[in-house]
Image (spheres, rainbow, N blue to C red):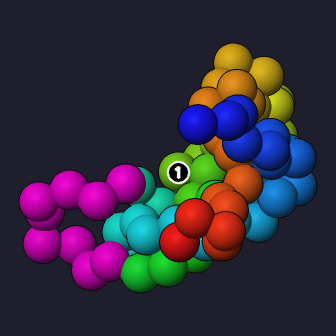
Amino acid sequence: MGQGVKMTKKEWLDEEVFRDIYGRPYNLSDVPMTVMTREESFKKQGGSKEDIDEYWKKNKHLYQKESLKNA
């Protein structure tokens, strides 16, 4: 299986994610869940632009665009 296409930072920040209303990943608490962009999630958790940049630099190799070919 070949290597996927890397996401750009903008694509990554604009991707919709399933989070609680405070922007945190799914957990077993009683807090309602919703869909928001990854950027909104970081901001709701108090993340600064610098925090987002640092996380992206360390983890960008983990994110790839989904391919509809093999779906």
Q: Position of residue 46 (x, y in %)?
A: 60, 47
Secondary structure mostly taken by the magenta-highlighted segment of the chain: loop
Q: Sort mark 1 into few (<14), some (14-19) or many (20+) by Cα contacts within 10 Å.
A: few
State the residue at coordinates (68%, 35%). 2
Q: Is residue 27 magenta?
A: yes
Q: Position of residue 28 (x, y in %)?
A: 11, 60
- Residue 39, compared with residue 18, is above or below; it is above
Quadrant for residue 15, please give it.
bottom right
Q: Is residue 27 left or right of residue 24?
A: left
Quadrant for residue 22, please give it.
bottom left
Q: Residue furthest front?
A: 1
Q: Nearer the viewer, residue 27 or 71?
A: 71
Q: Secondary structure at mark 1?
A: loop
State the residue at coordinates (72%, 54%). 65
Q: Residue furthest top?
A: 58
Quadrant for residue 37, please give it.
bottom right
Q: Which residue is mark 1?
A: 45
State the residue at coordinates (47%, 61%). 23
Q: Is residue 23 left or right of residue 67?
A: left
Tag 1: residue type?
Gln
Q: Quadrant of the N terminus?
A: top right
Q: Position of residue 12 (x, y in %)?
A: 75, 53
